[in-house]
Amino acid sequence: MKIEESKIKEHSGTSFSVTKTDGISKIDFGDGKWIENRDYYGEVLFGDCKCPGIKDLYNGVSFDKILIGGLGLGLLPEYAKSVKNCSVIDVVENNQELIDYIDFLESPINIIKGDALSYTPDKKYDLILIDLWWEKEDITQEIQDNIKNNYNSYLETNGKIILPIAEKEL
Amino acid sequence: MAVPSSGKISLLGICREKQNDDYTDTTAIQGGQGGNVVGGNGTISLESCATSGSNHSLQVVMEATNTASSSYPNGTTPHAMSEFYSYDHDFVPLSAKYVYTTSVPKGVFACSQTTTTSWYFPDSTPAVGDQVYTNSNGSSPPSAGKYGYCAACLGNGDTDYWFEVNSSGVITSVTVCP
């Protein structure tokens, strides 16, 4: 499940650019950090793949209310809406330029300006999914501990905090 | 450096390629019996280069011909120096791996993907520092990026490792898929 290409505009900004090649949009944050508008993004990070290490994180998990840390190109909230049929989809993002640019996501997706590592929710969620990093080596134990401490009390019963890139549930 | 592919070539150069792995390497040529050409413990000949053995007692015993090279002498008479054009004595054939060749932003996205074609590695176990090529003759490195490969596939299959190459096509990381 990717974003409908016609909704994505090319962009040249201060913190990122968006270009289209062969009809596929690519958001580039520089330093080798980029995301393309492709189906695999939501499929893999939500475990809908032949990837046991991530798929197993979602075993027995059902979720309707989700908090996503990191907006990116909007692929995860769009997947949560269109494939997972979540009724509450909050996204925490601290890049105002990115928030302003991603204007094509619709209700029930709600984008919140804030730091996903320290954001204080005003509600509880079934699933908190943090996608701020490019590789698992970027996610230190200290970061994991801080995330767990920050969000643990904002989980519904049987709720989970998942860091798919780290293949971890906190 | 292999034997040139055309033009004038020398018997001494051919001998250097056979014994020193380099057509232009002027290191004293050591024969199989431990002597060297300069010291007089054997001579070189087109026959000894082409057949590897010492068919005549005074000839340096050459290393066996590397038949993995794209070009190599056929070892049968009449011998000809032209048979050595492009001969590369230390050529090591590249090892093919089935690869998912779409560059991905995060390594996990290259995992469990169906491979699409073969790329070529120095051996069957890709490792950091290995030069990767997209063709079997080793002339075309891939673009920098993160890709996946299948470790044991004999045809296209699902990737179980992802790896990253730099702008020269050299592997900078190899990671088993989760």
Image (spheres, coloured by chain):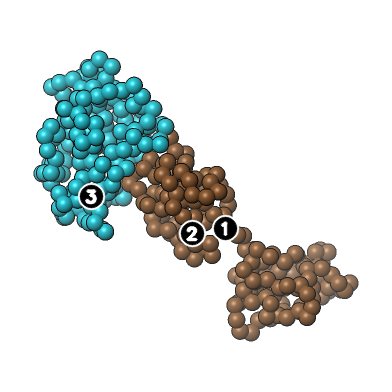
Chain colours: A cyan, B brown
Q: Do the dots labelled 3 and 2 sit on one chain? A: no
Q: Is residue B37 visible?
A: no
Mark closest to the chain's N terminus, 1 or 2: 1
Q: Which residue is mark 2?
A: B133
* Discs 1, 2 touching: Cβ within 8 Å: yes
Q: Which residue is mark 1?
A: B94
Against A76, residue B153 (above or below) is below
- Label 3 vs label 2: CA separation? 28 Å
* Discs 3, 1 touching: Cβ within 8 Å: no
* Count of all numbered marks drawn on residues in the image: 3
User: Which chain letter goes with mark 1?
Assistant: B
- Image quadrant containing the N terminus of chain B: bottom right
Q: Which residue is mark 3?
A: A27
Q: Say which residue appears at 70% left-offset and 80% top-offset.
A: B81
Residue B147 at x, y = what percent? 41, 49
Which residue type carries mark 3?
Ile
Q: Check disc 2: other Cα within 10 Å, few if <14, some if 14-19, many if 20+.
A: many
Q: Say which residue appears at 23% left-offset and 52% top-offset.
A: A25
* Relative horizontal placement of residue A124, taking residue B150 as reference (left or right): left
Q: Do the dots labelled 3 and 1 sit on one chain? A: no
Q: Say which residue appears at 17% left-offset and 30% top-offset.
A: A89
Which residue type carries mark 2?
Tyr
User: Which chain letter goes with mark 2?
Assistant: B
Residue B71 is drawn in which quadrant? bottom right
- Label 3 vs label 1: CA separation? 36 Å
Q: Check disc 1: other Cα within 10 Å, few if <14, some if 14-19, many if 20+.
A: some
Q: Check disc 3: other Cα within 10 Å, few if <14, some if 14-19, many if 20+.
A: many
Give the SS element for disc 2.
loop
* Relative horizontal placement of residue A142, taking residue B87 as reference (left or right): left
Residue B15 at x, y = what percent? 72, 73
